[in-house]
Amino acid sequence: MTLTPAPFRDDLAQGPAGGRAFWATASDGVRIRLGHFPAAEGRGTVLLFPGRTEYIEKYGRTAADLAKGGYHTLVIDWRGQGMADRLLDDTRTGHVDVFEDYQKDVAAMLDAARALDLPRPYHLIAHSMGGCIGLRAVTEDLPVASCVFSGPMWGIRIAPAMRPAAWALSWGIDRLGHGHRIAPGTKSESYVTWQPFEDNQLTTDADMFDYLRGHLAAEPRFHLGGPSLRWLYQALAECRLLARRPSPDLPCLTFCGTNERIVDTARIRQRMDNWPGSTLHWVEGGEHEVLMESPETRNRITAQTLALFDAASAGKPARSA
């Protein structure tokens, strides 16, 4: 694989020293961006799958915590967001043609991890939409020794009375050739630029909220608004498909805030109740982004995550890469 240097806002990330970014090309020609945050030790590498609207630099602080535990971190800008190729003329609308296309980005990320000779075993941390992408990946033998999910999008929180309408509207308008239009009830501006800290659905930590706002004020290329109707239909269909799949034979932790208001917590409970060797941790008072909560919460989650990684690395080899 050919990797070329890409822009990287180290000043915004606040990650471990030596962070850098690369361009990579997926099998269908879409250009994605990958960020490597190094660690002094080489206990393994975390493949970090961000959520919708997110970007590499947002996880600088998380990577710094993982580096203290001896783990390198490789983060991805999915197609359609961050500095990766945007897929619509309206670059502020989140879009994907087919949800499975994200697996092409996963494949490019794995190729890059090998090209960079990052230490093994690999482990997965996947947040929100990244949790949906990550679940498919681990059911299709992603070569990781363990996995951690944060507010995973295994279902989208929609009022039961509105769910049939969401399916019908997203499917019907896409069939009429208007699937590129932004989903009703969403905005073209990034969430933290217009939502006050009070009652935001991401974090209860004011410092972290300001950290995220500062990123968007400093770097226009990070901005992304609501999803397209095609993205919505594809996401609903992907969640339904994955709900029918058995969980893989992998150690797993999932963290979810008790005030989660974006993803479907019933789907999370159901999955974790039927995943042998897994544990579901509820973060009291936490919002959607528990990795962006208070330092105390983040420290506790990091400690549990590193304990899982260390035990999984010692207990059995990762799947063949």
Image (spheres, helix red, strand yellow):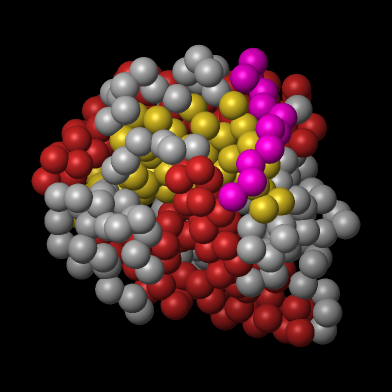
Residue 134: percent from the left, percent from the top? 43, 57
Above/below status of 206 relative to 255: above
Above/below status of 111 relative to 70: below
Residue 193: percent from the left, percent from the top? 72, 33
Q: Quadrant of the C terminus?
A: bottom left
Q: Nearer the viewer, residue 290 or 261?
A: 290
Above/below status of 298 relative to 252: above
At x 77%, y 79%, the residue is 173
Q: Is residue 4 magenta?
A: yes
Q: Is residue 308 visible?
A: no
Report whether 206 appears left or right of 136: right
Hey, which residue is sitting farthest right in the picture? 89
Report whether 86 appears left or right of 212: right
Query: How many discs appear?
Result: 0
Q: Is residue 310 visible?
A: yes
Q: Nearer the viewer, residue 178 or 135?
A: 135
Residue 110: percent from the left, percent from the top? 47, 51
At x 40%, y 30%, the residue is 72
Q: Nearer the viewer, residue 161 or 244?
A: 244
At x 77%, y 42%, the residue is 189
Report whether 263 appears left or right of 139: right
Q: Is residue 59 magenta?
A: no
Above/below status of 155 relative to 190: below
Residue 162: percent from the left, percent from the top? 57, 72
At x 19%, y 50%, the residue is 317
The part of the chain drawn in magenta is 1-12
